[in-house]
Image: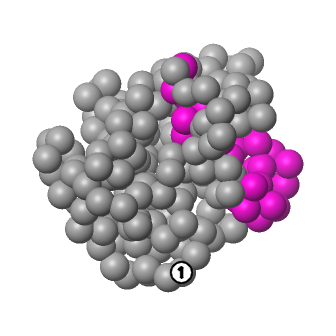
């Protein structure tokens, strides 16, 4: 019998140089720490092509390094044909969520798109931008630190959801649909 395919998660922001590479690095570290290395594949992309081929923003890379996260990244644009190979597409803000769902070729693919902070039990969806990770690009170190804090806060809940999805794959009758932490996320 062949080994099951890895559970594939792709984080998506605007240019794929700040938020999504940070989320990719943090979540990869959490998955490895949880013993899911090889069972979960983590990647990132941007909604647009502006930074394709570039590394992560130097401020994002510095904040990740300061907190002990490895970062190896080359920016690229999300492609519609990736939906079929992905289990979850994690949007960093509601603009990305709507754009990715509009790109999805099927309702099943659209259902794979979730907001990262919907996995943070302390995030308040009723506040302005409550489930968004604000873009730190035009800010300084403080904005990148705040971005990292939000990503870390949501990563544990996302890891729980991915673990549950992996467990569901082991049960033949259970569907492997992505876990939905909150409505409208």
Query: Is 82 positioned to the left or the right of 105 in the image?
Result: left
Question: Badge 1: how crowded within 10 Å, few (<14), some, or many (20+)?
Answer: some
**In this rendering, does residue 136 appear at all?**
yes
The magenta-colored residue range is 98-121
Query: Is 82 positioned to the left or the right of 120 in the image?
Result: right
Counting from the top left corner in percent of width and height, residue 89 is at 60, 49
Counting from the top left corner in percent of width and height, residue 126 is at 70, 29
- Residue 12 or 63: which is nearer the viewer? 63
Quarter of the figure with the C terminus: top right
Counting from the top left corner in percent of width and height, residue 145 is at 29, 45
The quadrant in which residue 164 appears is top right
Q: Is 152 a magenta residue?
A: no
- Residue 7 or 14: which is nearer the viewer? 14
Give the colour scheme of this rendering: one colour
Counting from the top left corner in percent of width and height, residue 72 is at 25, 62
Q: Measured along the vertical axis of the image, is residue 128 above or below residue 72?
A: above
Residue that numbered label 1 is attached to: 49
Query: Is 52 positioned to the left or the right of 102 in the image?
Result: left
Q: Is label 1 in a helix, a strand or a loop? A: loop
The residue that appears at 77% across and 49% down in the rendered structure is: 110
The residue that appears at 54% across and 57% down in the rendered structure is: 12
Q: Measured along the vertical axis of the image, is residue 56 above or below residue 146?
A: below
Q: Measured along the vertical axis of the image, is residue 122 above or below residue 155?
A: above
Total count of labels: 1
**In this rendering, does residue 179 appear at all?**
no
The residue that appears at 54% across and 66% down in the rendered structure is: 14
The residue that appears at 52% across and 21% down in the rendered structure is: 122
- Residue 181 or 117: which is nearer the viewer? 117
- Residue 138 or 148: which is nearer the viewer? 138
């Amino acid at each position: 019998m062949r080994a099951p395919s890895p559970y594939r998660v792709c984080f998506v922001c605007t240019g794929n140089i700040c938020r999504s590479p940070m989320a990719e690095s943090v979540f990869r570290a959490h998955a490895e720490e949880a013993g899911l290395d090889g069972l979960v594949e983590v990647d990132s992309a941007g909604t647009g092509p502006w930074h394709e081929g570039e590394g992560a923003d130097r401020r994002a890379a510095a904040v990740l390094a300061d907190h002990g996260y490895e970062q190896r990244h080359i920016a690229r644009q999300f492609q519609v044909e990736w939906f079929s190979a992905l289990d979850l597409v994690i949007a960093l803000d509601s603009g990305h969520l709507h754009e990715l769902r509009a790109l999805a070729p099927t309702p099943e693919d659209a259902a794979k798109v979730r907001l990262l902070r919907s996995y943070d039990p302390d995030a308040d969806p009723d506040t302005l931008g409550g489930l968004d990770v604000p873009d730190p690009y035009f800010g300084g170190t403080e904005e990148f630190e705040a971005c990292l804090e939000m990503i870390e806060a949501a990563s544990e809940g996302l890891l729980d959801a991915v673990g549950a999805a992996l467990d569901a794959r082991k049960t033949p009758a259970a569907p492997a649909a992505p876990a939905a932490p909150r409505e409208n996320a």
